[in-house]
Amino acid sequence: MPHPTFPNLTVLDHPLIQHKISILRDRRTSTRDFKQLVNEIAMLMAFEVTKDLPVVPVDVETPLEQTRGYQVAGKKLVLVPILRAGLGMVEGIAQLIPSARVGHIGIYREHDTLTPVEYYFKIPAGGDARDFFVLDPMLATGGSAVDAVSALKKAGAQRIRFLCLVASPEGVGKLGAAHPDVPVYAAALDRALNDKGYILPGLGDAGDRLFGTR
Ligand code: PRP
Ligand code: URA
């Protein structure tokens, strides 16, 4: 159900997601467990986010008789992690949707100004006919997300969803204002940003915790 304050936001608060997000937030959680939990939460989220994908009927021959089955319609969907931390969400979703293609967008936040800097962009051809899932665990100021979606649209993408683990009110608002057509799915909507642009209570620096670079 859409959030009452943010029409672009759906918070996926399944009990298993809440449980896993709480372990993820814990500063004592190891890099190995962090990585596994990010993938598991992404997989659980993908199950919900894909529930309205259109299907087409197909004929299936069981060992006993012919029957009617269904397959997801259209071109293969595209997972687009925002580097680095978005990479942590790819494997979990790809286990659920093995046919998914993967594009990459490299963006980092400039340390002092928090301005996003794009350094890499590569997505599969035929973007106008595909569904894109942009992946990033953190939606903080929203700058990286807005730029990633703008870059995808410039390349022809029309159907884009944004999946994150933890969102801030500022980030959801900024993404909604810039791209009202892009639904945002989050495992949690947190309270605020601190003066360094970190989400509170958040989970710290997602990239560093995923890749052990702290
Ligand atoms: C983090 C995070 C998002 C971005 C969110 O990446 O993974 O991409 O910050 O912040 P924003 O909403 O204020 O733009 P970071 O810049 O730390 O890059 P990294 O993953 O390469 O470390
Ligand atoms: N990026 C992160 O990794 N964490 C935050 O809290 C904000 C941006």
Image (tube, rainbow, N blue to C red):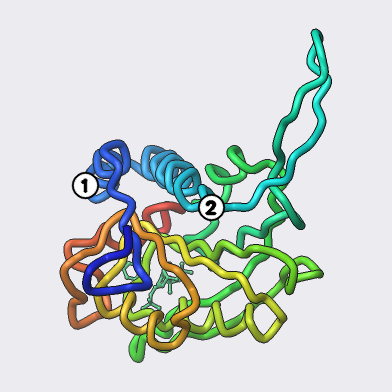
Circle 2 SS class = loop
Quadrant of the rendered image containing residue 9: bottom left
- Quarter residue 158 falls in: bottom right
For this view, does 168 lie left or right of residue 135?
A: left
Disc 1, SS: loop
Residue 31 % position (x, y)? 38, 44
Q: Residue sitting at 79 percent across and 16 percent down? A: 62
Which is more toward the observer, 182 or 190? 182
Q: Which mark is residue 180?
A: none
Residue topped by disc 1: 26
Q: Residues within 10 Å of mark 1 (few under 14, many from 20)?
A: few
Q: Badge 2 local density, few (<14 within 10 Å), some, or many (20+)?
A: few
**In this figure, which residue is indicated by the disc labeled 2?**
52
Disc nearest the viewer among 1 and 2: 2
Question: In the rendering, at what x and y percent does residue 195 appear?
Answer: 19, 82
Ligand 2 within 8 angstroms of badge 1 C-beta:
no
Q: Is residue 88 above or below residue 196?
A: above
Residues under labels 1 and 2: Cα distance? 33 Å
Say which residue appears at 50% left-offset and 60% top-offset.
Answer: 86
- Name which residue type carries label 2: Asp
Query: Ligand 2 sits in which quadrant?
Result: bottom left
